[in-house]
Amino acid sequence: MRISVIGCGYLGAVHAACMAELGHDVVGIDVDQHKVDELGAGRAPFFEPGLPEVLTKALETGRLRFTTDMSAAAEATVHFVAVGTPQTKGSFNADLTYVDAAIDGLLPFLSEGDLVVGKSTVPVGTAARLAGLVEGAKSGATLAWNPEFLREGFAVQDTVSPDRFVYGVPSGDAGAAATAVLDEVYATALATGTPRIVTDYATAELVKVSANAFLATKISFINAMAEVAEATGADVTQLADAIGHDARIGRKFLNAGLGFGGGCLPKDIRAFRARGDELGLHDTLSFLGEVDAINLRRRERVVTLTRELVGDLDGATIGVLGLAFKPNSDDVRDSPALDVVTKLVEAGATVTAFDPEANETATRSLPTLTTSETAEDAVRGADAVLVLTEWKEFRELDPAAVATLVAHKRVVDGRNCLDAVAWRAAGFEVRGLGRP
Ligand SMILES: NC(=O)C1=CN([C@@H]2O[C@H](COP(=O)(O)OP(=O)(O)OC[C@H]3O[C@@H](n4cnc5c(N)ncnc54)[C@H](O)[C@@H]3O)[C@@H](O)[C@H]2O)C=CC1
Ligand SMILES: O=C(O)[C@H]1O[C@H](OP(=O)(O)OP(=O)(O)OC[C@H]2O[C@@H](n3ccc(=O)[nH]c3=O)[C@H](O)[C@@H]2O)[C@H](O)[C@@H](O)[C@@H]1O
């Protein structure tokens, strides 16, 4: 099939490359010339394991190209819209200006029988509004909403073989035709038995935001239990292991620590709540405010634990390991680690940070940040070491070696990822979140 992907960021670049890998002819369109140049040269503009390989292979076949020219969409019959929907400045609402601009830009290049497929995460009601615009343009095109569930760090695998597909389509013949087109796009994964659920627009939009709301709630639940553990001397990790054995609960997404960040969970729960307010459902979704508050309190807690360890943060030297919002990513959007660094610096600490992949993105976001080239350089001379992203190389650090570098043997394990027994054996004072 001939496909265009509009918006080539964390979602769209992976989608474009994977669709070409699956045999489709794909043009990726983005307004960012630098991104388009990088992608066209086979370089991923962000760190995503496996993406450079898929990109290079797909470019070599000639089935993939990138451009800033929206008219290239005219060659395609299926158009994925994957632009950003960030939090609006000064409010919790999703900013839909990029989606609106992408649809506006696409309309003149649509033809009879084309399918426009929304992938961006949007407030419920958006697809119906955009369908009106697409139909109003009298192009003969149809709109479907096909939300994306990929995780950064596993984006290629999640795109090629997702847990499920959700198609939000209009009723009647147009919906049946849209479903048939999407089935053809995803034929490879469907052939292996990947479930697909066909719904109306509102259900598809809600599946996406409710999935993220559920995941965020699960993390905040365990972080609330961490607060209780801190007040009682209990161990939240053992608690999570124990309740996680109940198949109805499950152990995944029960890792207590610094909490969730990134370009999606925080802004999505806020936008969902804001949309709930617009729908008169304030009480129904107000618990998401608590989910957000619990999550943000964990960041303060790490600062408090550091202060308790070093005495006065003013003048303290802190070595920070981890800046990305999660391992295997260079994404620092709403990164809990970067937030903690900012708070420490505001309190007068001198911070040197290291992340295996996110030094550059973090420095772009926080230009005053001091980063180092290695974990060893970050912790050298530190009054306390903070582990804020659970990269494998930090989990595997030799505490005896770290002990020879630091000024004081103190560590705050913001992700409950260290072997506390081993670090204590090496002479470290260890503080975790919800762990004695
Ligand atoms: N990052 C992720 O893991 C996932 C993201 N999503 C959703 O996908 C959407 C995109 O997210 P990301 O890829 O993370 O954002 P991003 O910010 O990395 O990428 C968005 C891209 O769209 C481009 N763009 C903006 N306006 C444009 C226009 N008018 N025409 C063409 N390109 C335009 C930007 O230059 C940028 O490259 C959001 O709604 C997000 O919630 C959903 C699932 C996973
Ligand atoms: O809508 C999106 O963009 C995506 O958001 C999340 O994916 P992602 O943000 O890539 O990362 P997650 O693995 O969900 O982690 C999110 C945050 O939660 C934190 N987390 C995760 C799990 C856990 O047990 N504890 C915990 O604190 C992570 O450290 C990270 O900061 C969802 O998992 C995806 O399904 C979804 O498509």
Image: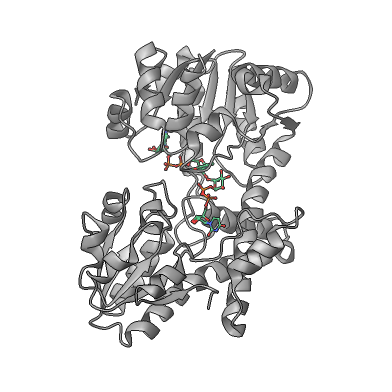
Q: Residue at x 26, y 55 (%)?
A: 363
Ligand 1 visible in quadrant: top left
Q: How many marks?
A: 0
Tell which residue pokes out farthest to the bottom in this image.
Answer: 311
Foreground of the two, 34 or 435: 435
In this view, the residue in front, 193 or 58, is 193
The answer, for residue 221, to whether it is visible in the render is: no
* Residue in view at x 46 percent, y 15 percent: 74
Relative side of 422 to 221, left or right: left
Measured as percent of width and height from the top left, residue 259 is found at 51, 63
Q: Is residue 98 left or right of residue 368?
A: right
Occupied quadrant, residue 383: bottom left
Q: Quadrant of residue 46?
A: top left
Query: Of 225 and 206, which appears nearest the observer?
Result: 225
Q: Is residue 118 above or below residue 137?
A: below
Farthest residue toward the front?
Answer: 425
Image quarter in which the N terminus is found: top right
In percent of width and height, residue 360 lies at: 26, 50
Relative image position of residue 204 (x, y in whole percent) = 69, 38
* Rendering coords of residue 76 (x, y %): 50, 15
Q: Is residue 374 visible?
A: yes
Colour scheme in use:
one colour
